[in-house]
Image (cartoon, grey):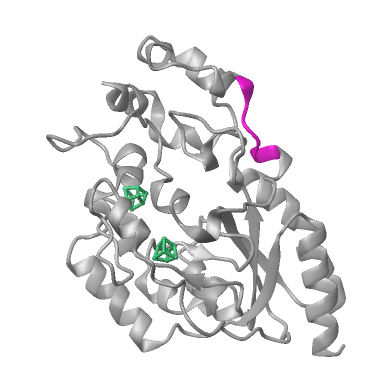
């Protein structure tokens, strides 16, 4: 099989599965600069309480450890930007859980890869393995990482979920895009927690997205959530690359039951109501106690 066949047929299948961009990167250790920056970030404690980011450093540095014989990474971006916005929830959280949706959508793509190269193996990763997905997406040429720490896909913006398929076969690899996001600085200025350092770094201890979703325990004194209770889109909303967002996949469109919720509804919500409204939703990550804390 020619490598060009890998690139065309398989990336086309990813696009048919709903991706707005798809390209291959070689599966190899991350470059030493990126590995060093990540370690510095951890050593400063900028990952907050996300202890899991300290684990599996060897795998994060070398994705080949995630699949025996891995040689390629198919990187895909799926759109979730909303035209109908929630005042309480981040755009990515108003529909179905992307972990489940994307794994299902990528299943046939992985099957195609395995039949395209007989005897090859694949592994689908949707934000669950210690894989540096923005790094690999940039390496594949899907986009550039902006000062807001998001992958920006040209003509699409940053409101995309990233997902990958590791593969034991070789492919025709994309080339990193030249240049940067434009560095207008709007995201740095607009960030309410001053979490962005203006050089591409982020301090999660100051980020409303981290604090409302991942952080356990009381919120820092004086924190202003500006009405948000799950996530924050500000550094993406102000980014000129997001002036036009392609339509979200249907599964990620807002659930009426979520859009109808008020802060009072959440303050008085029972566990049964929470489980029903947020069944198969990424919001479950914060748990009901987390939502109630954020409302308070
Ligand atoms: S998500 Fe919100 S708080 Fe976090 S860096 Fe972006 S603007 Fe700042
Ligand atoms: S708002 Fe400006 S600086 Fe921030 S990511 Fe977008 S283009 Fe880059």
Residue 196, given in percent of the width and then of the height, sits at: 28, 60
What is the magenta range? 251-256
Residue 132, given in percent of the width and then of the height, sits at: 46, 69
| Magenta span contains residue 134 | no
Q: Which residue is drawn at the image coordinates 24% and 66% (left, top)?
A: 42
Q: Quadrant of residue 253?
A: top right
In screen coordinates, is 225 left or right of 82? left
Q: Which residue is drawn at the image coordinates 52% and 56% (left, top)?
A: 127
For the C terminus, give its image quadrant: top left
Q: Nearer the viewer, residue 115 or 201?
A: 201
Residue 94, given in percent of the width and then of the height, sits at: 56, 33
| Residue 243 against residue 142 in the figure, above or below | above
Q: Which residue is drawn at the image coordinates 55% and 23% (left, top)?
A: 259
| Residue 133 against residue 276 in the figure, above or below | below
Q: Quadrant of residue 53?
A: bottom left
In screen coordinates, is 28 left or right of 48? right
Residue 206, given in percent of the width and then of the height, sits at: 23, 49
Q: Is residue 113 visible?
A: no
The outermost residue toward the left is: 221
Q: Is residue 279 visible?
A: yes
């Amino acid at each position: 099989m020619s490598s060009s066949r890998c690139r065309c047929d398989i990336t086309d299948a990813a696009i048919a599965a709903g991706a707005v961009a798809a390209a291959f990167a070689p599966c190899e250790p991350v470059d030493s600069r990126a590995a060093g920056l990540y370690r510095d970030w951890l050593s400063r404690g900028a990952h907050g309480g996300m202890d899991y980011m300290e684990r599996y450093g060897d795998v994060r540095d070398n994705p080949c450890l995630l699949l025996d014989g891995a040689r390629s990474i198919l990187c895909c971006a799926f759109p979730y930007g909303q035209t109908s916005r929630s005042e309480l929830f981040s755009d990515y959280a108003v529909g179905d859980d992307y972990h489940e949706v994307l794994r299902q959508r990528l299943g046939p793509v992985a099957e195609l890869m395995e039949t395209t190269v007989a005897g090859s193996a694949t592994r689908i990763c949707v934000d669950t393995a210690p894989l540096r997905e923005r790094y690999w997406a940039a390496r594949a040429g899907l986009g550039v990482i902006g000062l807001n720490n998001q992958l920006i896909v040209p003509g699409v913006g940053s409101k995309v979920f990233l997902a990958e398929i590791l593969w034991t076969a070789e492919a025709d690899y994309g080339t990193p895009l030249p240049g940067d996001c434009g560095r207008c600085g709007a995201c740095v200025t607009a960030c309410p927690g001053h979490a962005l350092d203006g050089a591409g770094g982020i301090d999660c201890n100051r980020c409303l997205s981290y604090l409302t979703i991942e952080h356990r325990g009381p919120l820092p004194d004086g924190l202003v959530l500006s009405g948000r209770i799950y996530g924050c889109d500000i550094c993406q909303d102000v980014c000129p690359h997001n002036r036009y967002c392609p339509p979200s996949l249907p599964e990620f469109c807002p659930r009426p039951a979520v859009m109808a919720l008020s802060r009072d509804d959440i303050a008085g919500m029972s566990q049964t109501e929470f489980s029903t409204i947020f069944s198969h939703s990424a919001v479950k990550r914060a748990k009901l106690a987390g939502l109630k804390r954020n409302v308070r």
